[in-house]
Image (cartoon, rainbow, N blue to C red):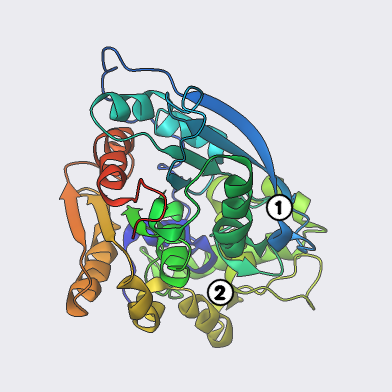
Amino acid sequence: MRITKLCCALVLAVAVAPAPFVWAQVQTMVPPVVAGAKAVAVEHIKIHGAALEGNLEGDVVDRDAIVFLPPSYAKEKHRHYPVVYALHGFFIGAAQWTGEIHVPQTIEGAFAQGARDMIVVLPDSKTIYNGSMYSSSVTTGDFENYVAHDVVSYIDAHYRTIPNRESRGLVGHSMGGYGASRIGMKHADIFGSLYIMSPCCLSPMGGGGPGPADRMKEMAIENEKKIAGLKSPTDAPAALPGFGIAQLATAAAWAPNPKNPPLYLDLPTKDGVPVPEVQAKYAANAPLMFVDQYIGNLKRYRAIAMDVGDQDGLRVDAAKLHDVFDKYGIANSFEIYPGTHTSAVADRFQNHVLPFFSKNLCFETGCK
C-alpha cells in the first residue's frame, strides 16, 4: 500500500516514523500589510460541545473559538453576514493557527483588496493527543458534529449570520484539510462552498513506512511498550513527546474501544505486526475510500477548491481526490503552487481562500 511521506509522518499510529513534526507551527510567507486596511473585531469565545459530552479521553467540552467580525459589523446593525469556518491542523489549536495564517492581518488585507465582508470563525479542536482528526469517536468525542452542528448553531444564535448553507463556507489546512474533506462530504446540508488546503490522511494508512522494515517494526514495538505503561491519557504527552503522540491521536479517533481502558482505543499493530481488523477501521476513515458514497452531496456545493504546494508530499493524494471529483463531473478547481506544506499558508488564506468565498458564498438573505 503506497503512503506519501508526509501523510505517513502524520499518522505514526501506523507508520511509527520518528521524523519531527516540521509542519505544525512554522514560519510562513506573510503578505505585506495592505495600506488603508480597516481593522476587524476579534472576539474570543467558548462554545459548548454537546457532541463532545461524555468523551472517554477527558477532553474539555467547552472549547475556545476565535471570531473575526468584518469592519462593517459594528456600524451596520441590521446587516447579516455569511460565515467561513476555518479548521486548524495537528499539534496546534485555533490560537496558534492565528499565527500561521497571520489573522487578523490577512483577513483585513483580503477585505481591503476587494473581498466582501464576512465573518470568519476558528474553532479549536486540539485534544490531549494534539488533534481530534475532526472525526466521530466515543473516545475523543464527536468532533465532526461538533464543528458541523454545535459550532454552527452557536454562531448563528449569537451573531448576525445568514443562517443557510449557501452562506456558509468550510476551509481547513493539513489535518484541517482532512476535516474539511470529511465534514464537507458528509454535511453538504450545512455548508455551501468548500476549500481544502494541503489535506492530510486522504489514503488508507498501511502498516509500513519509509525506511528499513526491521527498524520500523522495532519502533512500533517500542511505542507499544510505552503506551502499555500509560495509566491515563494525561500521561501520554510526556511518554510520547513530539511526533509519537500522533499514534494515539489517530487510534483514539479511528479505532475507539470503550472496553479497553485506560486509553479506550486499539492500536493498528501488535508486536509491530499489523492488526487487520484495526487497520480496516483506519481505511474506513480515509476520504479517498468513502468519497464515492458522497458524490450527491459534493454535487450540491456551489464551489469546491483545493490547493497544495509542489514540495508537499501530500500533493499526490490531493491530486487523486481532484481526479475523483473530475471523474464524477463535480465542478472544482485544483492548484499546485510553488511551496512546501506550510510556506505559503498565510498568503493563500488572504489572496486565495477569502477571495474564493467572497465569490462563491451567498451574501443576501434568502438567495440560492
**The N terminus lies in which quarter of the figure?**
bottom left
Give the total of numbered labels.
Answer: 2
Which residue is at a point 29% across and 36% down the rendered structure image?
343
Instruction: Give the SS element for disc 1.
Output: helix
Q: Is residue 61 left or right of residue 84?
A: right
The answer to which image quadrant residue 281 occupies is: bottom right
Q: Is residue 202 left or right of residue 207?
A: left
Q: Please, is residue 153 above or below residue 345 in the view? A: below
Q: Nearer the viewer, mark 1 or mark 2?
A: 1
Q: Is residue 343 left or right of residue 100?
A: left
Which sits in the foreground, 210 or 9? 9
Other residues around mark 1 within 10 Å, as few (<14) / some (14–19) / many (≥20): many
Instruction: Give the SS element for disc 2.
Output: loop
Q: Where is residue 130? Give x, y as percent.
A: 60, 49
Q: What mark, if any, has residue 39 been given in the picture?
A: none
Which residue is at a point 28% across and 23% down the rendered structure image?
112
Which sits in the foreground, 14 or 362? 362
| Amino acid marked by disc 2 | Gly
Residue placed under numbered mark 1 in the picture: 236
Q: CA distance from mark 1 to mark 2?
A: 19 Å
**The C terminus lies in which quarter of the figure?**
bottom left
Q: What mark, if any, has residue 272 been given in the picture?
A: 2
